[in-house]
Image: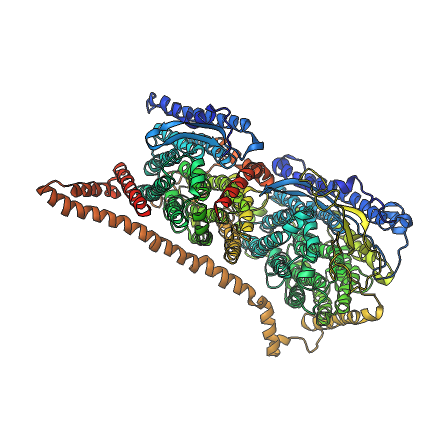
Amino acid sequence: MLGATLSSGWFLENAWLIPLIPAIGFVFIILFGKKMPQNGSEIGIVSIGISLAIAIGATFQWIDRVNSASGGSDYASGGFFGAFRAIFPTAADGGYGASFVEPVVKSWTWWQSGGLEFGIGQHIDGLAIMLLLLVTFISFLVQIYSTEYVSGDRRYTHFFASLTLFSAGMLVMVLAENMLQLILGWEIMGLCSFMLIGHWWEEEANSRAALKAFFTVRVGDVGLLVGTAIIFFGANDWAVEHGSNGFSIRGISAWALSGEASQSVLFWGGVALFIASIGKSGQFPLHTWLPDAMAGPTPVSSLLHSSTMVVAGVFLVARLYPVFFVGFDILDTTVNFITIIGGITIIVAAALAFVQDDIKKVLAYSTVSQLGYMMLGLGVGAWLPAVFHIFTHAFFKCALFLGAGSISHSGSHHSFDMKKDMGGLAKKMPITAATWMVSTAALCGIPFFSGFFSKDEIIDNASHNGYQFFYYVALVGAFMTPAYMTRATYLTFFGKPRGAAAGEHHDEGHDDAHGAAHADHDDHNGDAHDDHGAHDDHGAHHGPHESPWRITAPLIVLSILAIGSGYLNAPAFGTHYFTDWVEPVGVEVALDDEYGYSSGEDESAGIVLAAVQAGDEEYDVKAKGCGFADPSEGTVCYAPKLSHAVFSWSKAMPSIILVFAGILFSAWVCMGIYGDRRNPFAGLTSKFAPARWVHTLLVNKYYLDHLYEKVIVFAFAHPIARAAYWVNQNILDGIVNNVGRGGRRTGEWVYRNVDQRVVDGAVNASGLAASEGGHALQPVQSGKVNQYGALLFGAATVGAIVLILVNI
Amino acid sequence: MQTITNDTWLLTVGTFLPLVGVLLMMFVPASEEKTHKQIGILTSAVTAAVGVYTLLRFDFDQSEKLQFFVDSEWITVIKSNYTIGLDGISLPLYFLSMVVTLLVMIYTWDNMPDAGNPKSFIILMLVLQVGMAGSFIAQDLILFFVFFEVVLLPMYFMIGVWGGDDRQYASLKFFLYTMFGSALMLVAFLALFFQTGAASFSFAHLMEAGALIDRDVQIWIFAGMFVGFAVKVPMFPFHTWLPDAHTQAPTQGSVILAAILLKLGTYGFVRIAIPMLPQGAKAWAPAIGILAVIGIIYGALGCLAQTDMKRLIAFSSVAHMGFVMLGISTLTDFGINAALFGMVAHGLITGMLFFVAGSVKHRYHTLEISRLSGLLIQMPRLGWILGFAAMASLGLPGLAGFWGEFPAILSAYNPNFGLSEALFRTLMVIAAIGTVFAAAYLLWLYQRTAFGRPNPEFEQSAHHPVGAGVNDEHHDVDLHDVTKIEWIAWTPFLIAIVVFGVYPQLMFGVMDPAVSLLIERVGAGIP
């Protein structure tokens, strides 16, 4: 079975088209969008649709490839369904998928420096395939949803252009063959988030939020630039020797696990890169931009929070996992940089979700908290559960955001304020409510919903891999998540309808500024031009109702997946498709010298392998295997050998109990605080001072925004910048001006005292020269530049002669 | 140095062709403004066509060699020859100067500065073009110096005659400051000449002989060149002429200044100072690196403090040229490649920003950031172009600016020839933080000028003169989006920014062999 050729196919070989098509789509929308019958949205949908089709094809072919690598005979090329029917071994540890599946790598010369050529291309492995499929799928649904949600918007075309480029950016990053390509996608997303969050830039709050998002992420990007540099120079020599280079993902991975990499280079490279992840994935303490990013239209939030942008940071860690694995000694310690940040983020963000009135902000903090879980998973060596959590989270979080959008679109009259404008919506919006409930259940980690299967695995593996403390942190998070979601659900769908949900007509000092933006909307068009509390009093208004199909259809699809996606890897039911298809196998792979590195023309540039596997013995996990022992001569490792915790219901019990406890407790508290039921929690913050303090602290977001905006940013933008400019104008420029002025005065003095007096007596050479100088230095007033030039040349000649004399 | 002597006429024609236009215009009376503009555009177009032909004839597989090489006697008394040639280092800049002049000339068709008199204005620009192109082809130190100085006077008059309110001060400061640098530079050139045995001024000779000079002497000579070039770049702390000159210069002057003139300084470092004085360069490299990084942060802080859009863009040049100089100071092939790329990218991007600033000024008669708002509503296309240029300027990958910035930062991790790693790695981190500042000042500028609602002051144009008493010129505000002439002048810039950003190999492929050879040569000179 070894040495069998891996199957490939057109879709796998041409996966690079997946980002390219939306990128071209973007250009077309910008150029021709406004002239199209649907104002450009059709270009966006079609381009994403084609990409989705290619991604689906590539997924099938990848599954075939995996199957062909691990023997083939059991599940001979039956495509997706064949693979589904195949019976997999059920051992939870190390027993399946034992062959390394070579990624489909392609590279074309992009730039060169110092005689080395660097490429751009594709690196298709399980992780890339998973995200390609996920991103195109979610983007497709979000675009359909948007045609309804933002219809009539004055920048409808631009919105679709940005949305399409956003997806393209994420896709470029996902299949990046090297670090620079990854940075390219990463930054394109940053740009698009800026454009989309600031979509309604007439309002200053929105443009500020856009700026904040771009800027905060940019702070983290310093780490990306520095980390890439560190890793490049660390890896380059080794990688070039092995037919790759220091930017290549494969080269870096193999180098990190080769045993020849310096631990400190890996550590500092890892720290720098993780700082980039902190910025992009909204980890503490750079999470503050994410809630503000809610200023963008809801479809943007849903795309940004589910499968693009914020996932990029998690993806970076997962992609370069060997660097972090070795650099941070994962599995050898009980604490590391990633787990600390991930753990803090889970708790800190979940706590903030309790005090939000804005439904989207609850979801935003929930995303931050869930991203903390993913990071924690990566930090404790649970690579697969973390990546699986990206997958499941994308569906239910997207559904939740689109649900919130549906509520504001048709239920709360463009308000997102749960306390003011919602309540009791379950009856009026049954589809939205049902999909919301399902997605919430998935988010909370209720058994048999998808979130359970991924989150519980992270928690289980934290304990399995010896990260006991973080196991408890994750359990606390497991309690908090259902608690805040119950609160949000209660406020939105239950209790008495309030404000707009009760059909009330708002009038909050509507002025012409808004009227202008609203003028061309009729009510049913859904004026999605403003988010928070922008109210429209034009046209007829008829209370909350269910949204039209273009909104509910994506909701239904997503909520089905919010249940179903979990069963791809539900150890409780013995499925581990995801493990087989996505997880890279940490075994030694023989290097094939025959191919070597042959400049950019070779399409499969990079480390070329024979499909020969070096060792086949059972590994004693902690003693031997990639990432624990150096690969033997002539072989390399691309992924660390990770073990998986074996699922059992008894181990899952604590988290299950906590989840239900969270729901019940929260429901009880909510009824006290927001409902009529009298219990000790009613009016708690006014009765009990410490509760009030905590509440104030949370409402002020731990004062982090104050620190960043009012202290750090303010200091640089105002006093420090002004001080620097003052130095420039008064000291540096002062010197220049004084030298000029001094020169002029000297000239005048010489003219008066030497020229006029001495020349009167007897003409002498020095007087003449001084006179020349005197005149020449006057151009400060008279502009006799030529004379001055002549003088300078003369002086230069004299100086040159002096210098020569000195040096001879 | 290996040379190829094909098409020997090409560079001379390409460089001096604008003088033909000047000659023609001498015979046309100044009142026929249109004819002058036509001659100007025609001349620069023909020049640019020669440039295109040069590109076609250039052998890209041997871009490390000097091509179209000519070496004929010139001033025998001082052993200076007319030696010219073009290799991968100078080709992009040489061509850029031709294109920029053409586009600026086109822009002038509709946008003659207020002082009028297109005849003199266009003649000056053509002379300027001769100086710029000449500087990039010169392979003889005296020849280089002559071209280098030829540039000075036209620019002095452009600022001094067609500039803003404070033009007298700005133009004189520009002239004297640069003169001061030139003087020291000339001293250094002459010292180098005599120290190498007073045999020849040709680059090839000086590169071989210069490396043999004593280390201490090299350091002194390098100091002279350093001041001369650093003023031109400009590097902190010699930059104070730049904001004034840029702010006061007419749009055309600002664009040429940013796009080409500043590059004469960095080009001088790469072409002359470093290869001729390797040991001096090594000794000076840490100082250059430190000043470069100070320039990055300091320039950015200066930007944050600005209330005038054009002055802000001017300060951003200080920061961007800091990245270029950081790349050069590492003395690595990576760094110098990045620097050369950064020079062209900065020329395109900052040139574009100055164009936009000029157009904003033309329409609103002010560049006060606090008075500008809602550009995207009043002039959406102009607003988009400003946003595009700002994004390019802050180093977004996929646009040209990134390829000058990131490899420069990268190269500082591993400086060449045993330069202090600890120092350069610190510089790398600070420079990387500089990219955050770049995002800050550019996006903040964009937020304040392009977003939001238009300032009511400029709300309508037809009947009320705007800001009477605030503006010196009581024009009516005539808010119109990008005009046809502006599109023609700007589109090549916009396309080039995207093309070089998406496929940087176009330029790296040309420069890299020449740079590798250069570094090899420098390495040979350092024991």
Could you say which quadrant of the image residue A773 lies in?
A: top left
Percent x, y of residue B225: 39, 44
In this picture, residue B254 sits left or right of residue A405:
left
Colour mode?
rainbow
Q: Is residue A339 above or below residue A19?
A: below
Q: Can residue B389 be seen from the camera position used here? A: no
Viewer-nearest residue: B90 or A662:
B90
Residue A51 is at least partly visible in this image: yes
Snapshot quadrant of residue B38: top left
Q: Is residue A426 above or below residue A32?
A: below
Name the outermost residue toward the left: A761
In this view of the protein, which residue sits in the foreground, A221 or A437?
Answer: A221
| Closer to the camera in the image, A658 or B187 | B187
| Residue A10 in the image, given as x and y percentages of width and height | 78, 39
For the image, the number of numbered tags is 0
The image position of residue A92, as x and y in percent, is: 84, 62
What's the residue at 27%, 42% (across, down)? A798
Give the vertical position of A717 relative to A178 (above or below): below
Q: Position of residue B35 (x, y in %)?
A: 39, 23
